[in-house]
Amino acid sequence: CIDAVVEGVHFERGTQARLAGAKACARALSDLAASGAEPRAVLLALRAPRAESETRLRALIAAVDSTARSHGAALVGGDTTCADGPLALTVTALGEFVARGKSPSRSRARAGQGVGATGAFGGSLLGRHLRIEPRFDAARWLLELGATAMMDVSDGLALDLSRIARASGVAIDIGV
């Protein structure tokens, strides 16, 4: 799974390096969890403007590595480049599907199945978007229960549910 974060889009200029780096890694790992895979390694592509300090860049890299390790993976490589424009981190999370059966996908939702969520929604103004928690334990549990479609909803519940509905050819009704 590959995910990118860009300063000024996904986090504000001046955000602590440990929070920005952790978010970059956690977003990719969260997508990996939703695929039912176990994390093994991450790769980091870091694009920074010339004026960025080496200290901050090292802190970003350390945060990616620390976040990966906290979920059983390791930062094993990547690339750095210097370019005009905002700081950007792109993390590739590599994993292995070890559960029985087929891996979940957007296209495997079926009519009559329930919809559930494992975390809270909203809170970006409170900084929750900087504290993403990949839900590997929840993914394992859902797979054991027979889940066929799972997705990280970091792009927003409505948008991501529409993606599952379109890929699976089903309508999704959220009762309140």
Image: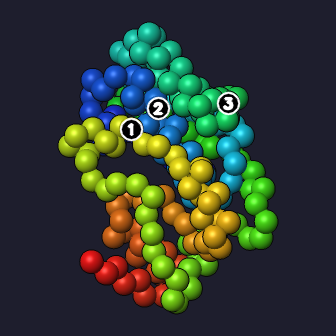
**Disc 2 marks which residue?**
22
Quadrant housing the C terminus: bottom left
Kind of residue sitting beneath label 3? Ala
Q: Residue at x 63, y 29 (%)?
A: 69
Residue 149 location (% of width, % of height): 57, 72
- Alpha carbon of mark 2 to alpha carbon of mark 3: how far? 13 Å
- Alpha carbon of mark 1 to alpha carbon of mark 3: how far? 19 Å
Residue depth check, mark 1 versus mark 3: number of the one nearer the observer: 1
Label 2 residue SS: helix
**Disc 1 marks which residue?**
131
Kind of residue sitting beneath label 1? Arg
- Is residue 176 visible to us here? yes
**Disc 3 marks which residue?**
74
Residue in front for this viewpoint, 176 or 48: 176
- Alpha carbon of mark 1 to alpha carbon of mark 2: how far? 8 Å
Choose the circle earlier in sequence order: 2 or 3: 2
